[in-house]
Every structure is written in structure tokens, then in C-alpha cells.
Image (tube, rainbow, N blue to C red):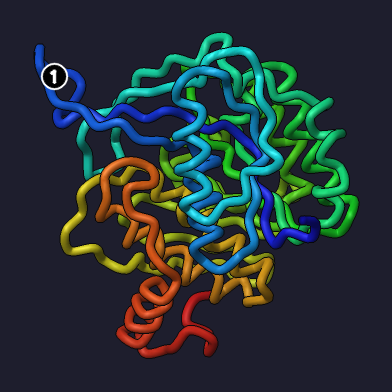
């Protein structure tokens, strides 16, 4: 199948979710096995938002690869283009959290995902030139030198073909240094239709500011067409090149775990842009989906159906005196 609405380039991880904060975990602490990673989380959200979505990734040959791919397919993602490598899948452990300040322990060294390379991108060239949108991240670019080159090659291919690129720097100090992450951001920002970053975490590390408006301005100065700056449950700042404004995120009255909420925002927003929605409306849907996603545990524990996302976005916009499709969020 060619002509996807959304392609997601990145890493899929085995997720082990402990029932306690990691620093408080004791012998015998229960844990739940699942599958996540920013690429899988974003792809699941894009598919749920109505986009024909395919995952471009490399997975391993261990015993968890089959259930990993089955989970992705169950989430509505086309996994037929995923490549295999004779290495284990990466994994991570995280503790219970609702606020977004999470502790992670990763096992990624020599993982299958880290073998992503420009050669893989070349094999996917027809898909990349035919897609409406691509999602990738700084995490993917930090896995290895080959992965970094793959991210840049894929971004250039999609941009050159007139497609939309969404990029999240997703800075992880255990994966890469600030200088390397800043260099990648500077090279990829001019190719983006939407650059999503977090504040204060990414903004401090990569843009030397804890102010969302300044962070957005610096991303725009790097060449990003539009910038969304998220702040957990706090207001999102959207700079679309014509207007800069803060927008409150719909409240989830019973949050369980914030893991993957930013990925859900990016996946949903990108899907709706690819499907023809105005950026303002796409962002409103992205915020609603991200809010709903924290009702589940882990990165794909709750992937909201688009009907629920649209209902929350409309109700939230109505509470602000406007409606989605009528300038609710700009």
C-alpha cells in the first residue's frame, strides 16, 4: 500500500511498568508488560485519529517481537514495512506517575532499533515521497549515528516531495548530549511543518529558556513553520507564524499516567493536518487526545477513539466560547 496519510519513523520498545515509583520499588513490586516508544505511541494516536498510518522501524528477533508487532497492528498501524535485525528489542522500566516527571531505566545498547540507517530510508523512499506526513523525533536521531542520518534523510525526502514533517526533539540526556541534540534540531527545523517541544524540559536543554513564547520564537528563528510548546497540564502555546497564543488543555479529572501524552498530541495533530484540518483545529484535537490518553497506564494504555477526542475538543472549545472549526484554537 502506498500513499499513506502518516508515516512514523522511530523506535518501538518493550515497556515494563512498575506499580510504584522506581526509587521506592521494593523486592516483589508488581509490574505490567506492554509496548511503547515514542514512535509507537504517535503512530497509534495517528491511526486512532483516522489516518492511514504505517510504522517505519527496525525490530529484533527475540521472543517479544511477534507480540510487539501484533500489538501495533491491533492499534491500527500498518507494520508491513517494518524491518528485522538479529538483535534484541530495546526495553524500558518506568514507575507510576500522573504529573509527567517520570523516572525511566532503559536497556537499549545494541538494540535492533538502533540499527536504523539511511539504507533503510532508501528502501522506504517510495513510501516517503508518497506520504502526506512524517513524524519523527530527537530520540530516534539519538539512538546511533546511523539513526541520526536516517532521520535527516527521511525528513529531507518528505520535505522535498512536498509532505508535512512533524518533529519532537524529545531530549534525553542519557541518549545524547545537548550539543548533538541542538545541532540536529537546527538542521531539521527548517524542514518542519510543525515542531513540537516541551517546556521547561526541552526548552531549557536545547533553547536556553524556560519561557514558552521565547522557546517558540527561537524554534521559528531556526526555520520551523509552526511551533507547539507543551507544558504538561499547563496551557499549550501555538505559534503558527501569524499568531502566538496560549490555549488551555482540557482537564482529565482522573489521570493515571502521563507517559506518551506528548506523543499522542503529535500523532493526533499530524493525522488531522494530513487529513485536511486547519492547524488550529488539529491542535485542538491533539490536546484533547493527549488529555484523554493519561487515563491509561503506559504509552499505549489509553489510545482514545477519535469520536471521544472530537467530543472533548468540542466541549472544551464550547466552554471557551468558541467551537472547533470556528477558530477555537489558533
- Looking at the image, residue 8 sits to the left or right of residue 223; the answer is left
Q: Is residue 308 above or below residue 112?
A: below
| Residue depicted at x 32% and y 48% | 301
Q: Position of residue 186 (x, y in %)?
A: 72, 36
Q: Position of residue 329 (x, y in %)?
A: 49, 76
| Residue depicted at x 57% and y 31% | 11
Q: Quadrant of residue 292?
A: bottom left
User: Tag count in the figure?
Assistant: 1
Q: Is residue 176 visible?
A: no
- Looking at the image, residue 123 sits to the left or right of residue 295; the answer is right
| Residue depicted at x 49% and y 20% | 90
- Looking at the image, residue 149 sits to the left or right of residue 172; the answer is right
| Residue depicted at x 68% and y 75% | 276
**Which of 128 and 210 lies nearest the eye of the viewer?**
128
Neighbor class of circle 1 (other Cα within 10 Å; few <14, some 14-19, many 20+) is: few
Q: Is residue 102 above or below residue 231?
A: above
Q: Quadrant of residue 259?
A: top left
**Which of 298 and 247 lies nearest the eye of the viewer?**
298
Q: Is residue 186 above or below residue 198?
A: above
**Which of 226 and 305 lies nearest the eye of the viewer?**
305
Residue where numbered disc 1 is placed: 25
Quadrant where the N terminus lies? bottom right
Q: Position of residue 228 (x, y in %)?
A: 54, 56
- Looking at the image, residue 71 sits to the left or right of residue 295; the answer is right
Amino acid at each position: 500500500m502506498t500513499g499513506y496519510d502518516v508515516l512514523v519513523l522511530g523506535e518501538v520498545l518493550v515497556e515494563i511498568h512498575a506499580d510504584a515509583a522506581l526509587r521506592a520499588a521494593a523486592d516483589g513490586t508488581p509490574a505490567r508488560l506492554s509496548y511503547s516508544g515514542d514512535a509507537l505511541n504517535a503512530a497509534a494516536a495517528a491511526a486512532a485519529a483516522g489516518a492511514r498510518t504505517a510504522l517505519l522501524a527496525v525490530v529484533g528477533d527475540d521472543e517479544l517481537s511477534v507480540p510487539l508487532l501484533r500489538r501495533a497492528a491491533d492499534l491500527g498501524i500498518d507494520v508491513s514495512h517494518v524491518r528485522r535485525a538479529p538483535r534484541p528489542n530495546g526495553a524500558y522500566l518506568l514507575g507510576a506517575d500522573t504529573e509527567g516527571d517520570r523516572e525511566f531505566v532503559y536497556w537499549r545498547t545494541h538494540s535492533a532499533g538502533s540499527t536504523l540507517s539511511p539504507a533503510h530510508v532508501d528502501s522506504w523512499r517510495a513510501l516517503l515521497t508518497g506520504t502526506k506526513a512524517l513524524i519523527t523525533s530527537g530520540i530516534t536521531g539519538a539512538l546511533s549515528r546511523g539513526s541520526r542520518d536516517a532521520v535527516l534523510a527521511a525528513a529531507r525526502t518528505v520535505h522535498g516531495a512536498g509532505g508535512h514533517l512533524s518533529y519532537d526533539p524529545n531530549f534525553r540526556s542519557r541518549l545524547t548530549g545537548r550539543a548533538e541534540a541542538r545541532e540536529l534540531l537546527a538542521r531539521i527545523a527548517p524542514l518542519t511543518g510543525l515542531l513540537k517541544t516541551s517546556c521547561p524540559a526541552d526548552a531549557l536543554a536545547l533553547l536556553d529558556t524556560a519561557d514558552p513564547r521565547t522557546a517558540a520564537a527561537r524554534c521559528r528563528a531556526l526555520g520551523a513553520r509552526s511551533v507547539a510548546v507543551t507544558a504538561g497540564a499547563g496551557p499549550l502555546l501555538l505559534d503558527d507564524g501569524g499568531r502566538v497564543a496560549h490555549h488551555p488543555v482540557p482537564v482529565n479529572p482522573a489521570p493515571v499516567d502521563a507517559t506518551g501524552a506528548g506523543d499522542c498530541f503529535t500523532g493526533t495533530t499530524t493525522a488531522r493536518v494530513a487529513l485536511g484540518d486547519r492547524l488550529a483545529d488539529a491542535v485542538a484535537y491533539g490536546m484533547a487526545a493527549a488529555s484523554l490518553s493519561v487515563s491509561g497506564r503506559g504509552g499505549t494504555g489509553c489510545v482514545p477513539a477519535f469520536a471521544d477526542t472530537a467530543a472533548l475538543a468540542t466541549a472544551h472549545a464550547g466552554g471557551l466560547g468558541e467551537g472547533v472549526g470556528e477558530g477555537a484554537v489558533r
